[in-house]
Image: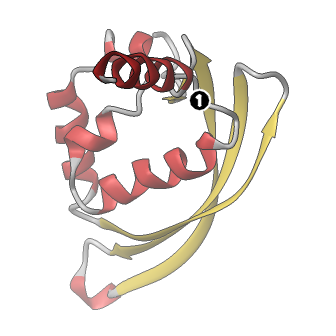
């Protein structure tokens, strides 16, 4: 009986490892929710393995924390996706953020904005692939 249980568990684990295109909907939102919550370890986990070779977790956390000095991301909403294959998709999200102007007399503004992210499938898992800076 125990052997059957172990075999069934193993089969479920093997078949459950591959992510579908539908997983991008929630993964893209969860990545932004982690950024909003300042959970940089979680947010970094969504980056592609190749990108992680060029950007350390510490560097990503520092850059994101510095951006939060003026920008406060408030909410994220999945809008849609366009997949040209089963290995690459563009994901549209609406991010609402609050920007505080450098001079207090100018105040702050809260704005929704649409962004498009690129996601790639590597070895059965979907990863966020940020735009590379020119010259990199």
Left or right of 31 in this view: 77 = right
* Residue 1 appears in the rendering: yes
Residue 41 vs 31, above or below: the answer is above
Label 1 Cα crowd, 10 Å radius (few <14 / some 14-19 / many 20+) = some
Left or right of 21 in this view: 121 = left
* Residue 63 appears in the rendering: no
Locate residue 29, reporting x and y percent: 50, 55
Residue 96 vs 53, above or below: the answer is below
**Residue furthest out toward the front:** 1
Locate residue 32, reporting x and y percent: 42, 54
Residue 118 vs 52, above or below: the answer is below
Q: Nearer the viewer, residue 27 or 104?
A: 27
Q: Identify the residue at horizontal 60%, vertical 41% (top origin).
A: 23
Q: Quadrant of residue 43?
A: top left
Q: Nearer the viewer, residue 67 or 47?
A: 47
Q: Quadrant of the N terminus?
A: top left
Report the colour scheme.
Answer: secondary structure
Left or right of 38 in this view: 81 = right
Give SS at disc 1: loop
**Residue position marked by numbered label 1 in the rendering:** 19
Left or right of 84 in this view: 16 = left
Q: Identify the residue at horizontal 52%, vertical 28% (top origin).
A: 16
Q: Identify the residue at horizontal 68%, vertical 43% (top origin).
A: 22
Locate residue 4, reporting x and y percent: 40, 20
Q: Nearer the viewer, residue 125 or 111?
A: 125
Q: Identify the residue at horizontal 72%, vertical 32% (top origin).
A: 89
């Amino acid at each position: 009986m125990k052997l059957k249980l172990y075999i069934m568990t193993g089969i479920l684990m093997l078949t459950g490892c591959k992510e579908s295109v539908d997983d991008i909907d929630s993964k893209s939102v969860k990545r932004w929710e982690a950024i909003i919550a300042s959970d940089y370890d979680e947010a970094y986990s969504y980056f592609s393995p190749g990108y992680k070779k060029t950007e350390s977790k510490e560097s990503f956390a520092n850059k994101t924390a510095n951006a939060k000095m003026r920008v406060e991301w408030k909410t994220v909403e999945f809008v849609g996706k366009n997949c040209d294959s089963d290995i690459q998709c563009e994901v549209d999200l609406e991010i609402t953020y609050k920007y505080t102007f450098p001079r207090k007399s100018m105040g702050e503004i809260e704005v929704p904005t649409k962004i498009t992210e690129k996601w790639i499938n590597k070895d059965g898992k979907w990863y966020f692939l940020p735009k590379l800076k020119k010259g990199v």
